[in-house]
Image (cartoon, rainbow, N blue to C red):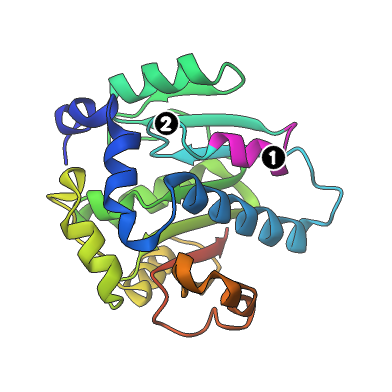
Amino acid sequence: MDRAEFDKFADEYRALHARHLVISGESPEYFAEYKMSDLAAEYRMRKGAAAASPSVLDFGAGIGTSIPFLRKHFPDCALTCIDVSIRSLEIGANRFRDAAFLLFDGKTVPCAEESFDMAYAACVFHHIDHAEHVPLLRELCRVLVTGGLLAVFEHNPFNPLSVKAVRGCPFDDNARLIAARSMYERIREAGFRSADIRYRMFFPHLLRAFRPLERWMTWLPVGAQYYVLATK
């Protein structure tokens, strides 16, 4: 999907996203919150409970869906959001005045080396040509400090409900889902010194009583989503 396509969907992004998530019984905010909750837990596990004010890069931030939930866990973090969509950045900047919104040219992250303690991409890479993944991951590695943390969240192509949801979403028309192992290998190729795969979202809303079990199921490759967590 190119910049013009993202701009076209920016104003109705939340409504479209909610519509294609009906199959899960959850809202876009539910999925955004679990990502930020997991990211905060992983970061503090590595950096300690006192690590409350990291500098953070939201890669492919769109209209800023993740921001309230990142702020919930890291209220004092320095947040920079980048995206290729000018309209999405305008909407995000109007919604959230406590973050920097920068235009991304699709190739070079507009930030200096070692600018961030942590970076994340929330279901962004399936919109990007697979040949561009490693160069972009190298860019994310470049702007992280040594020991910095990267989390790449994606839909699991081996989960039929995820595949169905993506196929039914208009802004995913040109999406190509990525297997977790492939993303892991690309991240390592990009120069990250370690990486781990975590599978998530095993139970839809009707079975939400079982969700506490998910903490012991992150190895099981059938979750609706996954993330690869990497350290520079």
Residue depicted at 62% across the width and 20% down the height: 98
* Quarter location, residue 34: bottom right
Range covered by the magenta-colored residues: 67-76
* Mark 2 Cα shell of 10 Å, populated few (<14), some (14-19), many (≥20): many
To which residue does mark 1 refer?
A: 72
- Report x, y in % for residue 200: 49, 70
Asked if residue 70 shows in the view, the reply is: yes
| 33, 207: nearer the viewer | 207
Q: Is residue 137 above or below residue 203?
A: above
Question: What amino acid type should be assigned to the residue bearing mark 2?
Answer: Ile
To which residue does mark 2 refer?
A: 82
Residue depicted at 76% across the width and 57% down the height: 44
* Quarter location, residue 1: top left
Question: What amino acid type should be assigned to the residue bearing mark 1?
Answer: Lys
Residue depicted at 42% across the width and 36% down the height: 61
Using the numbered discs, state the Cα–Cα distance from disc 2 to disc 1 in whole angstroms: 20 Å
Cβ–Cβ under 8 Å for marks 2 and 1: no
| 61, 109: nearer the viewer | 61
